[in-house]
Image: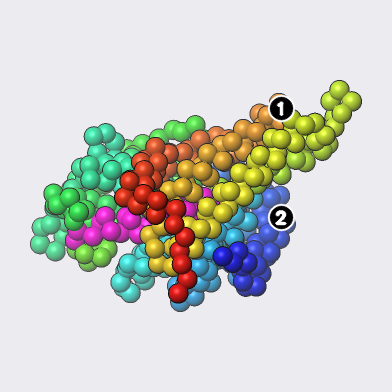
Amino acid sequence: MDFSISPRTEDFRARIARFVEDDVLPLEEDRSNYDPHENIRLDVLETVREKARSQGLWCLQLKPETGGQGLDKVGMAVCYEEMNRSIFGPVVFNSAAPDDGNMMVLEKTATPGQKERWLQPVVDGRVRSAFVMTEPHPGGGSDPSMMLTTAKRTGDRYIVRGRKWFITGAEESQHFILMARTSDDPRKGLTAFMFDRDTPGWRIDRRIPIMGPEEHGGHCELVFEDMEIPAADMLLNEGDGLKLTQMRLGPARLTHCMRWLGLSKRCVEIATTYARERFAFGERLSDRESIKMMLGDLAMQIEVGRLLVMKAAWELDRGSFARKEVSMAKVHVANLLHKAADTAIQINGARGYSKDTVLEWIYRYARQARLVDGADEVHKMVLERHLEQENRDFWRWQSGE
């Protein structure tokens, strides 16, 4: 097992680290750079994005012919972790959810004409996109077989009716990937479509208030009332929606973990700096055994998370779906992020609970990590299913050829 990274990946990592240090972290310090939903203001973002693009740090995850740098999943793990040292980092490099996952799945599944129409504007940073799947009860959430939104074919068009919610980025998105039911077949009943914001027959019912800071465009509830989508805007074939969903969500779950590791490390960084500077009862905080144990445990758990992420990335690069590896990484890193923010706030005391640092921002953001792209309990059920099927082979090593 070789854990070394290529010189090219290390070059990208080092340049991203410098860019974040010099051009992104300073933006966090000035509250005027935040929008009303506590993300980076769009006009500020466009300026720093242009600088990232000029330095060749744009869309590293995509193929060169698409406009990226062709990093594999292992390389992405290295670079995404570095990007998210800042809460603003991923979106600066056009590597933030949901655009990140949408671009990667469109690169794999869209026809040349569809790529030009739907993918390239997102790659160029001219528009944003959303993935429209989750529905309110009794519709589909973690179980897509429960999906109630329908797309009925009429000639060369599909008529869409239904309701979706918690659609990330919808308020700022121009391009949408929609999952809808086209038949009752348990495996081939779902189909994926593209539609444009300006398409008539749908609306945003509300932007759902949440406890944490929000991605650009928030989390919205969408209503479809006889929206027409041309059959030409179908992705893959009718009935391939579940296949496309699996292609998108597995890597997307892992890229979340890559970014969350960066935020976890940032929490340790803030806590360590403060512990070294703060004295109480005649003793530096960093010299106290309790603080040493808290930080040491976090350091270990972050490294465990990195190894899980790297194993899953390696499996994806080999062509595997890496379902159990991604599930293990997702559960561990989501819980780690919450623990890292909580521990760092505890060490910083009232300062950590205030807005003088980004810790409270990360803490509120972190709670969603155990829910998005599958709750902890769903992923643990996935792991138990693999265990039941594989028995002792659940832990087998891959042998070389």
Outermost residue toward the right in this view: 282
Q: Residue at x 49, y 31 (%)?
A: 211
Assign the C terminus to one quadrant of the image: bottom left
In 3D space, how far apart are the residues under numbered discs 2 and 1 (Cα atoms)?
Answer: 25 Å
Q: Is residue 155 visible?
A: yes
Secondary structure of the residue carrying tag 2 is helix
Outermost residue toward the left in this view: 155
- Nearest the camera: 165 or 291? 291
User: Is 135 in the magenta?
Assistant: no
Q: Which residue is mark 2?
A: 21
Q: Nearer the viewer, mark 2 or mark 1?
A: 1
Q: Which residues are magenta?
A: 238-258
Q: Which label was assigned to residue 97?
A: none
Secondary structure of the residue carrying tag 1 is loop
- Nearest the camera: 352 or 312? 312
| Residue 247 point in image, percent of width and height | 35, 59
